[in-house]
């Protein structure tokens, strides 16, 4: 809910990857509150979707301006939109964002609704980034894990061979912590993990959180952003801001470390991308709990804030080429399959 991440990437949809410029266009606080309400089940979907799409159009324009290129220089936009509902067990996933409007506004073809076909075929619809993680790390030793810590945390396990690709949501990422910090301080997140580092994680309360049945389920599996919100509110009651932050950070760390039991072989290295890599308390916790090298994507030359945006550009190309974007090992679909809906520019 921070804003729009936009990135340029040149690719053939397979091994050739040339990342370009990227930027983040923050949402203003009023729109962010409206989006947050919509995720919570309140608000005017059509109005928020229209504004969200316009925000993405402005982000595209800004990115092209800083890159010194025009719409005619871009073949396709991969447009994820924003998830307001994700219940794959009910064959439902809902990403708002008007692909046809974005194509009109930008003058560029758009591929959107990249999760729908997967869910309709019985898949989880998430995570979709593993195929991009594999391409991005093609020259790195296997087995390897790429950990994305967004609102929800998800991991990609990459082994040797075409089918050695597994992906799943590990549990909470930043969402619970961000909501806690916003509710108690008015700030959007725990900058550098400072409040988390100052608190006490309350091991007994942590033990209650990690008993949720999701963590024992075998992948493929995925989560809605607010899957643990109700249980967290109950367990966090009466804690100080610092202790609540420490507990929620420990919850994310513990569930990520436990998620490794589902991997065929333990990774040599974990590469961390997404906003959570900026939380030093979280990164320190991962290094203490996981017996492997923990590296931020930035430290190996990746653009840690652009990975998700790059991934959906990559998937848009694969969609146009009818190449798979999801696999039995990543979303649980019965066979590798493509996805996405094409909206043509005028």
Image (cartoon, grey):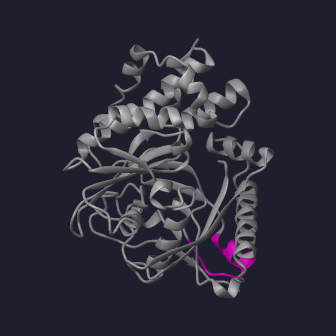
Residue 125 vs 7, above or below: the answer is: above
Q: Is residue 60 left or right of residue 110?
A: right
Q: Nearer the viewer, residue 256 or 42?
A: 256
Residue 10 vs 139, above or below: the answer is: below
- Res. 224 visible in picture: no
Determine the main secondary structure of the stretch shown in magenta. Answer: helix
Residue at 76% across / 56% down in the picture?
Answer: 47
Is 84 a magenta residue? no
Residue at 72% across / 83% down in the picture?
Answer: 70
- Res. 234 visible in picture: yes
| Place of residue 26 in the rendered image (x, y in percent of width and height, measured from the top left) | 73, 53
Q: Nearer the viewer, residue 346 or 22?
A: 22
Residue 238 vs 36, above or below: the answer is: above
Residue 329 lies in quadrant: bottom left
| Place of residue 229 in the rendered image (x, y in percent of width and height, measured from the top left) | 53, 31
| Place of residue 31 in the rendered image (x, y in percent of width and height, measured from the top left) | 77, 48
Q: Is residue 212 left or right of residue 49?
A: left
Which residues lie in the magenta part? 99-111
**Residue furthest to the top:** 238
Is 105 a magenta residue? yes
| Place of residue 305 in the rendered image (x, y in percent of width and height, measured from the top left) | 57, 56
Q: Nearer the viewer, residue 314 or 18?
A: 18
Q: Is residue 339 left or right of residue 107?
A: left
Residue 335 vs 51, above or below: the answer is: below
Residue 136 lies in quadrant: bottom left
Q: Is residue 223 left or right of residue 107?
A: left
């Amino acid at each position: 809910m921070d804003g729009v991440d936009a990135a340029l990437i040149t690719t053939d949809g397979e091994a050739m990857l040339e990342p370009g410029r990227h930027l983040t266009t923050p949402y203003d606080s009023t729109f962010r509150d409206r989006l947050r309400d919509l995720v919570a089940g309140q608000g005017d979907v059509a109005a928020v979707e229209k504004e969200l799409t316009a925000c993405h159009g402005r982000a595209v324009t800004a990115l092209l301006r800083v890159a010194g290129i025009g719409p005619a220089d871009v073949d396709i936009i991969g447009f994820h939109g924003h998830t307001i509902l994700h219940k794959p067990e009910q064959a439902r996933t809902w990403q708002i964002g008007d692909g046809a409007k974005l194509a009109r506004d930008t003058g560029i073809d758009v591929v959107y609704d990249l999760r729908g076909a997967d869910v309709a075929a019985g898949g989880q619809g998430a995570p979709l980034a593993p195929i991009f993680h594999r391409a991005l790390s093609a020259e790195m030793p296997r087995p390897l894990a790429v950990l994305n810590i967004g609102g929800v945390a998800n991991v990609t396990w990459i082994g040797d061979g075409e089918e050695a690709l597994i992906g799943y949501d590990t549990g909470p990422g930043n969402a619970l912590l961000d909501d806690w910090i916003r509710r108690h301080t008015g700030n959007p997140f725990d900058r550098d993990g400072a409040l988390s580092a100052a608190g006490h994680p309350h091991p007994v309360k942590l033990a209650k959180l990690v008993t949720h049945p999701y963590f024992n389920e075998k992948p493929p599996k995925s989560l809605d952003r607010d899957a643990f919100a109700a249980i967290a509110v109950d367990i966090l009651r009466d804690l100080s801001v610092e202790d609540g932050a420490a507990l929620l950070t420990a919850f994310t760390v513990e569930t990520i470390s436990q998620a490794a039991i589902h991997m065929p072989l333990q990774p040599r290295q974990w590469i961390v991308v997404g906003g959570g890599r900026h939380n030093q308390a979280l990164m320190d916790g991962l290094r203490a709990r996981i017996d492997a090298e923990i590296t931020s994507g930035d430290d190996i030359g990746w653009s840690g804030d652009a990975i998700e945006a790059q991934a959906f550009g990559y998937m848009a190309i694969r969609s146009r080429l009818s190449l798979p974007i999801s696999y039995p090992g990543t979303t649980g679909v019965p066979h590798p399959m493509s996805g996405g809906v094409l909206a043509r520019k005028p």
